[in-house]
Image: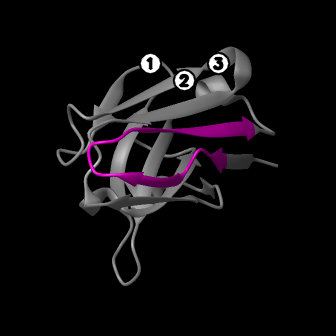
């Protein structure tokens, strides 16, 4: 059974940084695409970044140049380094696996989420 556990969320002022982690277990981690999505109340889940099994990364335009997705296959963990945070980055951030690129409906396994709050 696939299990994803996010951590690293918190509160930060605009311009600050946070690093999210997602520890995966229960499947062949290195063979699957990993992605981060985010969601605020009343809005649809929004793509953030993804990394495939070859290490190719893709980012939403809203986070390009500020966020970096990376993975440590030895630790079965994917990271999201978030720099130059803006209040509009405030959301619950979810880790997901088993899907394709930044299409949330293709992902079948999701973590519980970690809250990121950016104050102005």
Q: In front: mark 2 or mark 1? A: 2
Disc sitting over residue 73 in the figure = 3
Q: Residues within 10 Å of mark 1 (few under 14, many from 20)?
A: some
Q: Is residue 47 above or below residue 73?
A: below
Give the CA distance from mark 2 to mark 3: 6 Å
Q: Earlier in the sequence, mark 2 or mark 1?
A: 1
The residue labelled by disc 1 is 55
Query: How far apart, in angstroms, are the residues tagged by discs 2 and 1?
Result: 8 Å
Magenta residue check for 18:
yes
Q: Which mark is residue 114?
A: none
The secondary structure that most of the magenta stretch takes on is strand
Residue 31 image position (x, y, % from top left): 61, 26
Q: Is residue 60 visible?
A: yes
State the separation of the CA atoms marked 3 and 1. 10 Å
Q: Nearer the viewer, residue 85 or 108?
A: 85
The quadrant of the picture occupied by the C terminus is bottom left
Q: Residue at x 30, y 33 (%)?
A: 58
Residues at discs 2 and 3 in contact (Cβ within 8 Å): yes
- Image coordinates of residue 74 in percent, x first then y, are 71, 15
| Secondary element type, mark 2 | strand
* Label total for image: 3
Q: Which residue is mark 2?
A: 71
Q: Mark 2: few, some, or many residues within 10 Å (few <14, many ≥20)?
A: many
Magenta-span inclusion, residue 102: no
On the image, the x and y values in percent for residue 16 come to 34, 41
**25 or 118, which is in the foreground?**
118
> SS class of the residue under badge 1?
loop
Vertical side of 82 occupied by 107: above or below: below
**Which comes before the other along the chain, label 3 or label 1?**
1
Q: Could you classify mark 3 by the number of other residues whose Cα lies within 10 Å: few (under 14), some (14-19), or many (20 or more)?
A: some
The magenta stretch spans which residues? 6-24
């Amino acid at each position: 059974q696939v299990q994803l556990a996010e951590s690293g969320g918190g509160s930060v002022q605009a311009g600050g940084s946070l690093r999210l982690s997602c520890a995966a277990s229960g499947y062949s981690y290195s063979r699957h695409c990993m992605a981060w999505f985010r969601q605020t109340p009343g809005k649809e889940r929004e793509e953030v970044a993804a990394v495939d099994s070859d290490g190719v990364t893709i980012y939403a335009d809203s986070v390009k140049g500020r966020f970096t997705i990376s993975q440590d296959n030895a630790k079965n963990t994917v990271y999201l380094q978030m720099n130059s945070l803006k209040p509009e980055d405030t959301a619950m951030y979810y880790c997901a696996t088993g899907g394709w690129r930044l299409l949330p409906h293709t992902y079948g396994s999701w973590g519980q989420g970690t809250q990121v709050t950016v104050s102005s």
